[in-house]
Amino acid sequence: MKPYVYITRKLSEETIKELTENFEVKMWDHEDLPAPREVLMNEAKRASALITMLSDKVDEELLTAGENLKIVSNLAVGFDNIDLETATKRGIIVTNTPDVLTETTADLTWALLMSAARRIVEAAEYVKAGKWEGWSPYLLAGHDVYGKIIGIVGMGKIGEAVARRAKGFGMEILYHNRTRKTEAEIELGAVYSTFDELVAKSDYVVTLAPLTAETRNLFTADVFAKMKNSAIFINAGRGPVMDEQALYEALKNGEIAGAGLDVFEKEPISADHPLLQLPNVTAIPHIGSASTETRTTMIKLCCSNVKAVLNGDSPKTIVNKQVL
Ligand code: DGY
């Protein structure tokens, strides 16, 4: 009997060929909606491998149900949706998709920063709504990006790729990270700062930090209060690193000037979410790595990791090396 692989979202047959040629494969048959919990639980019981999305909760209950499970291959660089401790304890390999999405996610982060700074979404909606009656000096005037100070919280590979873009815009680059990045300091002139110093000095505070016990709720009311009134906050990492209510108050009360958000505390958000009622918020639906090319590469990487593990080989991008 061929090992059984379950994929929790509908992916193109072409991209998963490596699996269908070798294993029994089934996919949840909806592109946009997640598989219900009961389906996931049932499939986990049978599967030797799961390909999961960042929106799937791969918790202790699911991992324990997966008696045959050898690998959970997550279609994301972040793996905060997976109970890594339980997976490791049970000898289940967890893999992610680092590197292949670095530049694409940095592009999106940059697009979000530019959009929030220059009010691109608001301006486009203004034209489409037929409100444009003529040129005027301060019509939809935004903030400069060139020559300003960017502060990057979470200087991993994506953070460094954003810093490279910032260098091209003549920006002063501050960063905060668990470890110093000497290469980025030398090549890009990035300056290591304490978190407090970074938030106080930056015109653009960009967080790309992964969600961990240390980063959860990092951006509180006190932190927003320390930012410049002209600061723009960009979150293209994980929603729960910010206190959304505090961000809402800070934006509403003019403590900061704007926000560009690709991620939220609880996704998806609905149209009546308080942050969406503010004109100085540019919100997009967690599309950091969503270019067709990169998503294809990410899916192929997930498949190659599954194939390797089911064939008894080492996967390319393992998160919990200690299980090997
Ligand atoms: C990831 O891969 O973790 C990103 O959030 C995708 O956009």
Image (tube, rainbow, N blue to C red):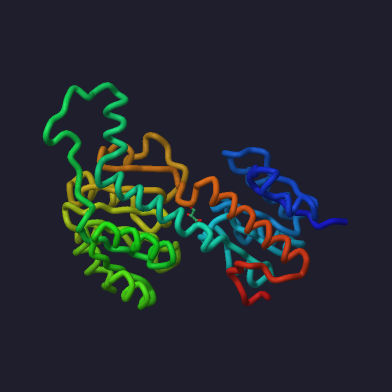
Q: Give the residue displayed 11% in from the left and 34% down from the top.
A: 137
Please provide percent x and percent y for residue 188. 31, 69
Relative side of 222 to 308, left or right: left
Indicate the quadrant containing the N terminus: top left, top right, bottom left or bottom right: bottom right
Residue 41, image x and y in percent? 69, 51
Q: Nearer the viewer, residue 170 or 4?
A: 170
Q: Nearer the viewer, residue 156 or 38?
A: 156
> Which one is nearer the viewer's eye here, 52 or 221?
52
Could you say which quadrant of the image residue 272 lies in?
top left
The residue positioned farthest toward the left in the image shown: 137
| Residue 270 sits above or below residue 235 on the image | above
- For image coordinates 38% across by 59% down, the residue present is 241
Quadrant housing the C terminus: bottom right
List x then y, in percent, for residue 57: 58, 54
The single residue placed furthest to the right in the displayed view is 1
Give the x, y percent position of residue 200. 20, 64
Residue at image position (30%, 32%) is 124
Q: How many circles with numbers are drawn on the protein?
A: 0
Q: Is residue 94 above or below residue 111?
A: below
Instruction: Tell me: 214 left or right of 11.
Output: left
